[in-house]
Image (tube, grey):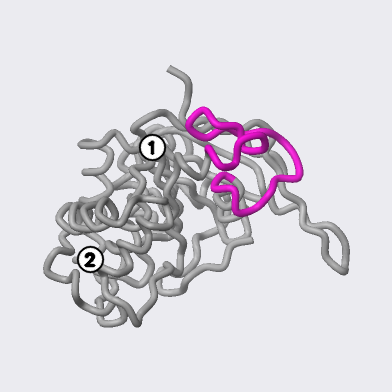
Amino acid sequence: MPPVISTAGLARTFRTKTGPVEAVRGIDLTVREGEILGFLGPNGAGKTTTLRMLTTLLKPTGGTATVAGCDLAADPVGVRRACGYVAQSGGVDGQISVREELVTQGRMYRLPKAEARARAEELAHELDLTDLLDRKTGALSGGQRRRLDIAMALTHRPKVLFLDEPTTGLDPGSRADLWALVRRLRDERGTTVFLTTHYLDEADALADRLVIVDEGVVVAEGTPSALKLEHAGSIDATLQDTFLAITGRGPAPADITPVAV
């Protein structure tokens, strides 16, 4: 079975007043169907740039990629139809209700009105938002708002879900709820999840496999246990120690939202 995501030499160079900046210098990776991939790296390693390229929000300046069988350059519309994207900051309108937000998202995907309303109810049930449908999104807690962000990304039943720092700023209970939701999406729907996070315990708990990038290239990949054994000498090592051994640098502080290039 072909991979759901495949890249070869994927690169992005930004032109600045002081000269070109190579944010991503050639990423080679594959992601299998139904896999939760943890995509890790220090600040400025190229994580968010890579994610934005794979979701068609940013054009590559080099290399190739396919998402769900759709070529990133030749069929960006096909890529967008196949993937859902939850950004670091989210994107809800605080002045409208959860129901209105979900229905509007459905209409943006060209669902008829009745179908968009039915899909909103279905998503609310699946993500424990039913009792909140008529509440203004601005009145939601952080965990509730994140569930809404994910519900919106699932409106069109994507094969691939991209999550960029999904639990930053959430309390432990809300984080645990989102972890359970991500596992359920994989186990019950077979959804492929591409996750970036600076919480290494989160990556350790959730990811089937990790890809670690630094300075725009892949520097290590494998299961959490395999990477711990290879780079920290024991499967009982922490992922923090393993990450430091691989990159020589620590992740961003957990209470600060990182800004990736």
Q: Earlier in the sequence, mark 2 or mark 1?
A: 1
Residue occupying image coordinates x 18% and y 57%: 121
Establish if 260 lies above or below 205.
below
Disc 2: which residue: 174
How many residues crowd around disc 1 within 10 Å: few (fewer than 14), some, or many (20 or more)?
Answer: many
Residue occupying the far top of the picture: 1
Q: Is residue 149 magenta?
A: no
**The residue under label 1 is which amino acid type?**
Lys
Q: Quadrant of the N terminus?
A: top left
Residue occupying image coordinates x 43% and y 60%: 165
Residue nearest the observer in this picture, 190 or 104: 104
Q: Position of residue 68 (x, y in %)?
A: 48, 32
How many residues crowd around disc 2 within 10 Å: few (fewer than 14), some, or many (20 or more)?
Answer: some
Residue nearest the observer in this picture, 219 or 69: 69
Disc 1: which residue: 159
Q: Magenta span covers which residues?
A: 54-78
Establish if 116 lies above or below 236.
below
Q: Quadrant of residue 171?
A: bottom left
Q: Position of residue 198 (x, y in %)?
A: 44, 59
Left or right, 149 with reference to 141: right
Circle 1: element type:
loop
**The residue under label 2 is which amino acid type?**
Ser
Q: Quadrant of residue 153?
A: bottom left
Q: Is residue 72 magenta?
A: yes
